Image (cartoon, rainbow, N blue to C red):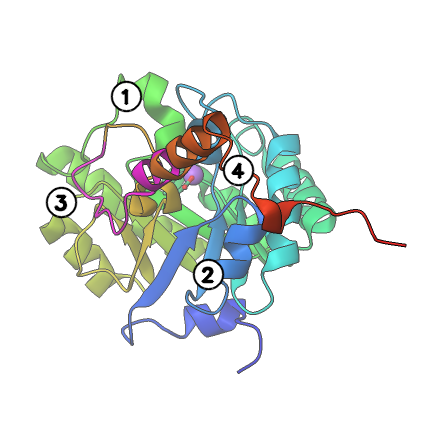
Amino acid sequence: AGPVTVPAIRARKGGTPIVSLTAYDYPTAQAIDDLVDFILVGDSLGMVVHGLPTTQGVTLEMMAMHGKAVMRGAKRALVVVDMPFGSYEESPEAAIRNAMWLMRETGCSAVKLEGGTEMERTIRFMTERGVPVLAHVGLMPQKVAMMGGFRTQGRNTELADKVMRDAEAVSAAGAFATVIEGTVEPLAREITEKIAIPTIGIGASPACDGQILVINDLLGLASDYMPKFVKRYAETSATIREAVSAYGEDVRARRFPGPEHCFGVKKG
Ligand code: KIV
Ligand code: NA
């Protein structure tokens, strides 16, 4: 099969669940390229790669740099790059200018932005002009300052109606799929049944048309704090510590480097 396209993802509505992960660098993209349908260069990189407290400090330049690295490693998976806080909210014109710059710099096929009804006009403006948009509704980490923290969405009906309206808006505006983050199961299910585009869940139940996780969380390459929706498939931080500790012991005991790692002097 050739490279995964935007229409191919769009056509997966109601079919075999779409598999997605974030990646931020070349070796990770290479390792997962044939195992996922699309790779998201998420602005979560601000937190999990750069150690920032939220995603609000992430810049377009940071997204472009990581996006380029991922593109070099991804041959088959579709690559979507997140638009960071401050790069699309002001106007449809600002959004498309920054999105096209990101696509040109990185060669990625699509961008993602957070927001529902308030972004409907922008998403329509972008998609009608050739910029494929993955939407992101429910819990929106870039709005953490407004929300006063990361909170599950849809627990009360007023907010649930808002998330439903957001999902309908981004679908109508031409997004090819939407992430639904941190949303209670009944609402995620209802949205998935109601809208025409695939829903990609993160903390939004198996009812969605696909799933995404932050790869550092899945790999256990992260801080001790883990949201409830994460399943750790490996303990990479522990593996790193074991390897480095063994290296340190070898160096101190002069067991490393061994004869097989040393350059000899040629005879004659
Ligand atoms: O930035 C990110 O990694 C994301 C996903 C978790 C959906 O937006
Ligand atoms: Na993001």
Q: Position of residue 230 (x, y in %)?
A: 22, 44
Kind of element beneath mark 4: loop
For ligand 1, which image quadrant applies? top left
Q: Which mark is residue 67?
A: none
- Whether pointer 2 and pointer 3 mark residues with C-beta atoms closer than 8 Å, the reply is no
Q: Which mark is residue 184?
A: 3
- Whether pointer 1 and pointer 3 mark residues with C-beta atoms closer than 8 Å, the reply is no
Q: Position of residue 247 (x, y in %)?
A: 45, 35
Magenta-colored span: 226-241
Q: Quadrant of the C terminus?
A: bottom right
Q: Earlier in the sequence, mark 1 or mark 2?
A: 2
**Amino acid type at mark 1:** Met
Q: Earlier in the sequence, mark 4 or mark 1?
A: 1
Q: Is mark 2 within 8 Å of ligand 1?
A: no
- Whether pointer 1 and pointer 2 mark residues with C-beta atoms closer than 8 Å, the reply is no
The residue labelled by disc 1 is 147
The residue labelled by disc 4 is 256
- Whether pointer 4 and pointer 1 mark residues with C-beta atoms closer than 8 Å, the reply is no
Q: Is residue 73 left or right of residue 163?
A: right
User: Where, by quadrant of the figure, is residue 143 drawn?
Assistant: top left
In front: mark 4 or mark 3? 4
Q: Which class describes the residues within 10 Å of circle 3: few (<14), some (14-19), or many (20+)? A: some
Kind of element beneath mark 3: loop
Q: Nearer the viewer, residue 54 or 69?
A: 69
**Amino acid type at mark 4:** Phe
The residue labelled by disc 2 is 32
Measure the C-alpha gap from mark 2 to mark 3: 29 Å
Q: Earlier in the sequence, mark 4 or mark 2?
A: 2
Is 58 situated above or below 137?
Answer: above
